Image: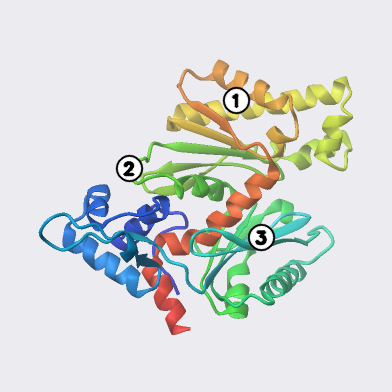
Amino acid sequence: MIKSGPVFTRPRTPAAKCLHIIRLNPVVTRSELVEATGLSQPTITRATAALLGAGLIRERTDLTQSRGRGRPTVPLEVADNNWMLAGIAVGTAFTHIAFFDTKGRTLREEDVATPVSRLSANDVIEHIIAGVNRLMTGLDLRLVSVGVTTSGSVNEAGRITAHNLGWDEMDIASRLEYQFGVPVVVSSVIPAILGSETQSAELGAEKPVMVLYADDSVGAALTVGDEIVQLELDGADALATQAMLNETGGDSFPAVVANADDQTRALLDDRARSLGTTAAELLTEHTPDTLVVAGGAFSDDPAAPKLFASAVRQATDHPVELRMIPSHTEIVRACTRAVALDPLLRVPLELGREAKAA
């Protein structure tokens, strides 16, 4: 199985760097790849030849440019092929399943009911497997990898610990690898949010970015060099949505916000400010250029973003760009796509060899 680097590592190999640049630009020449990557012409030639051989890119001979003497310049672009990449975002009530092609375009997507409070962990996995099989029906494409994102944390072995799911070192990867016979990568939702950012950033645009996620779980992650590192947070459970529901007796967070009396509103405001204080401490320690916030704590409570931003500015002098992902649906789709595309973008040639060997 694929062994290279942590999930969402920025492109390291020449082939991965070339594919990344070709993805982000409609048509690219080999000389432009040399300039963008800083790699030598022979290295780029070998990398693009390998990507062509794997069927991941193609030459646009119709756009060939002749520049005096010498070999004509033939641009490159991402190729259409028969590969399909699956992304799975596990939630407490529903799990989002989607298939993507190698250009990152959504082929199909569906929400599968997975009420974790009423299902065993094995039943949740069976529901997910059934959902993937159902969604594949009628698609004349080859599944080559599966990516999974969940709340909580994921250790180096890919095992998930998520209190809101009731999972303690759950090994979902082995079950899915056995079922589908393809490589499986697993990530927490928090690094996945950052992964969706770095996958669309040009090489060299690697200023530090931090994400703070506050919903069913609360956590943070940071870009460090070419990797994404999940950060430890003290008292995170007390700021999670379930803590708010327990304290207010509500069934859903949007309903709590909509029906808040003065006492409940004070609790919500305190949560927003506490998240701001937590963010400020992280900003002071890690000094990123950008802080991305996401999750229902911000998107489902209209008053929270302003209170949060004010608390951040009051608690730290570190200059930072604040940005919010505005909706739960946007987060889920971004994370699903990011974790699905990760093996392709991180280790494209290795994934191609896995596909041929299967």
Q: Which of the two labelled residues, at mark 2 and mark 3, occupies the earlier sequence position?
A: 3
Of the two numbered discs 3 and 1 in the rendering, the one whose residue sits closer to the viewer: 1
Q: Which residue is mark 2?
A: 204
Q: Which residue is mark 1?
A: 277
In this orientation, which residue lies closer to the viewer: 276 or 69?
69
Q: Is residue 163 above or below residue 301?
A: below
The quarter of the rendered structure image containing the N terminus is bottom left
Residue 80: x %, y % from top left: 47, 68
Of the two numbered discs 1 and 2 in the rendering, the one whose residue sits closer to the viewer: 2
The reply to whether callout 2 and callout 3 are in contact (CB within 8 Å) is no
Left or right: residue 108 versus residue 62 is right
Which label was assigned to residue 166?
none
Q: Which of the two labelled residues, at mark 3 and mark 1, occupies the earlier sequence position?
A: 3
Amino acid bearing label 2:
Gly
Left or right: residue 312 versus residue 319 is right
Residue 299: x %, y % from top left: 70, 35
The kind of secondary structure element at disc 2 is loop
Say whether residue 154 is visible: no
Amino acid bearing label 3:
Asp
Of the two numbered discs 2 and 3 in the rendering, the one whose residue sits closer to the viewer: 2
Residue 279: x %, y % from top left: 56, 30
Q: Which residue is mark 3?
A: 168
The kind of secondary structure element at disc 1 is helix
Q: Residue at x 69, y 33 (%)?
A: 298
